[in-house]
Image (cartoon, grey):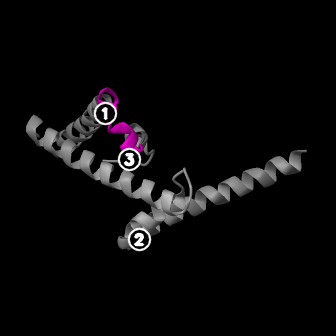
Amino acid sequence: MADASGEDVQEVSVLIFYPRALASNTEQKKRLKSALWFAIGKMVDDESLRRNMNATPQFIGALTELVWTQIENVAIDLESFSQHAGRTTVTTDDVLLLARRNSDLQSVIKDCVDRLKAAKVKEKTRSGKKK
């Protein structure tokens, strides 16, 4: 489970990639999948200990495959959205478009984007006053 610091998000953020380019690089794909397996295994172990339960390696493997497939689908959608807009870079607009069918998720993402933009503006005004 992600904690307040967002450490789990950072660990897995390396997995946001352009899947069409990755398809030809099986060694990189294996390394990414191993990193995902490790991150999921760590989260499952932590949660299992917290709840005093056990999880089998087969469960962790199945969960890893499920998450990997979801990441691939998300990456393909994000890549398609950015290409449709004539961009080569995925932006927060693409992520918000992806979340459009889940209003709660879209709201959380939008709030986060708004906070980051406000902090960026605040930082620019602060650095502008120092000059």
Residue, disc 3 = 3
Q: Nearer the viewer, mark 3 or mark 2?
A: 2
The disc label shown at residue 42, or none? none
- Amino acid type, residue under disc 3 in the picture: Asp
Alpha carbon separation for disc pair 3 and 1: 27 Å
Look at the image and tell me in which quarter the C terminus lies: top right
Which residue is rendered at x = 36% and y = 72% of the image?
A: 101
Alpha carbon separation for disc pair 2 and 1: 29 Å
Q: Which residues are magenta?
A: 15-28
Q: Is residue 80 left or right of residue 31?
A: right
The disc label shown at residue 100, or none? 2
Compare residues 76 and 47 and report the one nearer the observer.
76
Alpha carbon separation for disc pair 3 and 2: 24 Å
Above or below residue 70? Residue 33 is: above
Q: Residues within 10 Å of mark 3 (few under 14, many from 20)?
A: few
Q: Residues within 10 Å of mark 2 (few under 14, many from 20)?
A: few
Q: Position of residue 74 (x, y in %)?
A: 35, 55
The disc label shown at residue 29, or none? 1
Is 71 covered by the magenta stretch?
no
Disc 3 or 2, which lies upstream in sequence? 3
Q: Is residue 95 left or right of residue 42?
A: right
Disc 2 or 1, which lies upstream in sequence? 1
Which residue is rendered at x = 66% and y = 60% of the image?
A: 118
Q: Nearer the viewer, mark 2 or mark 1?
A: 1
Above or below residue 60? Residue 90 is: below
Above or below residue 52? Residue 79 is: below
Which residue is rendered at x = 51% and y = 65% of the image?
A: 110
- Amino acid type, residue under disc 1 in the picture: Lys
